Amino acid sequence: MPRPRHARFDCSPGCPVEGALAFIDGKWKGVILFHLQAETLRFNQLRRKLPHATQRMLTNQLRELERDGLVIRTVYAEVPPKVEYRLSPLGQSLEPVINALKSWGDEHLEIVPAAPAEPEAALVMSTQDSQG
């Protein structure tokens, strides 16, 4: 169940940060926004760029980005239907943030531990570490 969003973000000094992060929280939203900076993409083009995202997850994340006004979805009346995604002006305003995250990742990728592929692998690793 999605978390309810605040109606206003002036409730405390951290609320604007919480509000901004609420727009891009989600496993794939930041990566989707990153890829849409360069070009308008169709759904399957995005899927190829995010091979570890399931079709359902990608669809849900795109719907949320569209609902929040960050992505514009254009449907062309063709057979088969053609759907394209591009950044809205609000989404484009996040480009400096997304680029800053990419730069930080480029600089710190070596020191940030890679996440295990499966949750079970994380459990095994933490169990081994505590026994070590």
Image: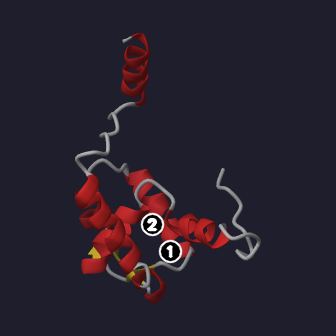
Q: Which residue is mark 1?
A: 66
| Residue placed most toward the observer, 20 or 28 | 20
Q: Is residue 36 above or below residue 129?
A: below
Q: Quadrant of the C terminus?
A: top left
Decide if residue 113 is on the left or right side of residue 93: left
Q: Position of residue 33 (x, y in %)?
A: 37, 71
Q: Quadrant of residue 128?
A: top left
Report the amino acid beneath label 2.
Leu
* Residue type at the position of mark 1: Glu
Residue 18 as seen in the image, left or right of residue 57: right
> Which disc, if any, is residue 19?
none
Q: Quadrant of residue 42?
A: bottom left
Name the foreground residue: 96 vs 62.
96
Query: Mark 1: which secondary structure?
Result: helix
Q: Residue at x 43, y 78 (%)?
A: 94
Q: From the top left corner, tell me how far across and down residue 65 is, in percent.
A: 49, 70
Residue shown at the point (32%, 73%) measured from the top left: 99
State the residue lying farthest toward the top. 131
The answer to whether residue 68 is seen in the rendering is yes
Q: Are marks 2 and 1 in contact (CB under 8 Å)?
A: yes
Q: State the mark number for residue 62.
A: 2
Q: Which residue is at 27% across, 45% downward?
A: 111
SS type, badge 2: helix
Q: Residue at x 44, y 52 (%)?
A: 56
